[in-house]
């Protein structure tokens, strides 16, 4: 199912992805080759290009005809890459997309400043649209993502983290950027208010579903599939929905054992395997899958306002793919 669905999507958007790749390279234009090397280490290491693609599809869904849509779409990938560079430094991560993180090669100061450059580049492209509402959307995304990451940092190791607190974190760190890409597609096309609202809803629910699926993969995928070592979240003290739910359902003895493993930064592979067993035993995996599926259905329902067309069909497939990655 996963490979077939992915093949359908890639086949449908292959031309768009080629244009996005070319535009990402052409629009980068730093003055220093080192900045280009560091930015390119992440930008051109196999990202899905989901955010610029959603901007393109949303603009087309609202009948935007301008070829500049591809150029403007890249701002969302630059912004996304900037946050990943910064996050890897904060988390002291070793791997990203199957290879060594940028800060492990060039050091944290250079990588943080390169992230700042990519953020500035995204703002420059937003200004080129000459639409104050898009500039405001990008500024709001930057604010919310920064606060989302700070919120997550403050909650690291919090053993009584609630589902509501978790939802607030993933709204800020993931959903807001995907929602903003979809909303900006409607804005640039000067779409009616109800269409803009529908695309905002689609982006929100898709973003939540994608993050929940990513959180599941941390417990269900191997390093090759994941692009980093499994169990990274728990080793960094990040409690995600599978673990939050399992802790709430566990009996006292198992809960205490799980809390002990979570609190031990040097837990071994056997301990991690034990945690995964508890997630299955107490329904953390199934519950998270169910919640992600609910958000996928809500995302697809948001598109009912639009007539059937190729862009709508692709966006429906993308919603299904959000959780198919974990199947």
Image (cartoon, grey):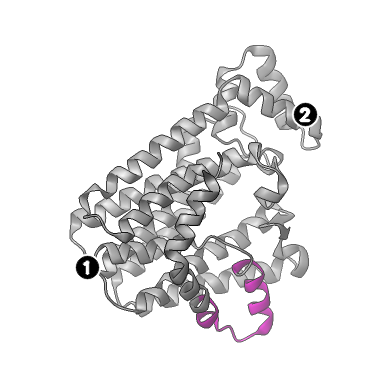
Residue 218, quarter of picture: top right
* Residue occupying the point 55% across, 39% down: 327
Residue bounds of the magenta highlight: 24-43
Q: Position of residue 110 (x, y in %)?
A: 69, 71
Looking at the image, the residue that sits furthest to the bottom is: 31
Residue that badge 2 annotates:
271
Residue 155: tell me if it is visible.
no
* Residue occupying the point 33% across, 45% down: 300
Whichever of labels 1 and 2 marks the residue nearer the N terminus, that label is: 1
Q: Is 302 on the left or on the right of 93, as rendered?
A: left
Q: Per the image, is 7 magenta? A: no
Q: Is the residue marked by circle 1 packed among few (<14), some (14-19), or many (20+) residues within 10 Å? A: some
Q: Which mark is residue 83?
A: none
Q: Which mark is residue 190?
A: 1
Q: Position of residue 49 (x, y in %)?
A: 50, 63
Q: Is 307 on the left or on the right of 167, as rendered?
A: left
Q: In terms of secondary structure, what is the magenta stretch mainly?
A: helix
Seen from the viewer's position, the closer of residues 98 and 154 is 98
Q: Is the residue marked by circle 2 packed among few (<14), some (14-19), or many (20+) residues within 10 Å? A: some
Q: Is 190 on the left or on the right of 79, as rendered?
A: left
* Residue occupying the point 38% across, 56% down: 314
Seen from the viewer's position, the closer of residues 303 and 203 is 303
* Residue occupying the point 46% across, 31% down: 290
Residue 311, quarter of picture: bottom left
Q: Secondary structure at mark 2?
A: helix
Q: Is 117 on the left or on the right of 263, as rendered?
A: left
Residue 133: tell me if it is visible.
yes
Q: Position of residue 184 (x, y in %)?
A: 33, 64
Q: Cα distance, mark 1 to mark 2? A: 53 Å
């Amino acid at each position: 199912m996963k490979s077939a669905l992915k093949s359908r999507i890639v086949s449908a958007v292959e031309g768009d992805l080629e244009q996005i790749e070319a535009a990402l390279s052409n629009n980068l234009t730093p003055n220093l080759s080192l900045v280009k090397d560091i930015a390119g280490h992440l930008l051109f290491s196999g990202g899905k290009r989901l955010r610029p693609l959603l901007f393109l599809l949303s603009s087309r869904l609202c009948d935007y005809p301008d070829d500049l849509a591809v150029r403007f779409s890249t701002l969302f990938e630059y912004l996304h890459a900037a946050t990943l560079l910064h996050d890897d430094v904060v988390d002291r991560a070793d791997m990203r997309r199957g290879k060594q993180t940028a800060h492990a090669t060039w050091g944290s100061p250079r990588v943080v400043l390169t992230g700042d450059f990519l953020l500035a580049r995204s703002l420059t492209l937003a200004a080129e649209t000459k639409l104050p509402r898009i500039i405001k959307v990008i500024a709001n995304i930057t604010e919310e993502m920064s606060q989302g990451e700070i919120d997550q940092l403050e909650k690291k190791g919090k053993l009584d983290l609630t589902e509501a607190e978790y939802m607030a974190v993933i709204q800020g760190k993931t959903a807001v950027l995907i929602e903003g890409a979809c909303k900006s597609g409607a804005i640039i096309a000067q779409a009616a208010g109800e269409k803009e609202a529908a695309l905002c809803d689609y982006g929100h629910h898709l973003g939540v579903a994608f993050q929940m699926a990513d959180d599941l993969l941390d417990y269900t995928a191997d390093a090759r599939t994941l692009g980093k070592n499994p169990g990274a979240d728990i080793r960094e003290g990040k409690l995600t929905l599978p673990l939050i739910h399992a802790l709430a359902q566990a009996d006292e003895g198992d809960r205490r054992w799980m809390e002990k493993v979570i609190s031990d930064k040097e837990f071994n592979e056997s301990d991690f395997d034990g945690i995964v067993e508890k997630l299955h035993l107490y329904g953390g995996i199934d519950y998270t899958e169910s919640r992600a599926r609910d958000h996928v259905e809500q995302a697809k329902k948001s598109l009912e306002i639009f007539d059937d067309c190729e862009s709508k069909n692709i966006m429906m497939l993308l919603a299904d793919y959000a959780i198919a990655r974990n199947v």
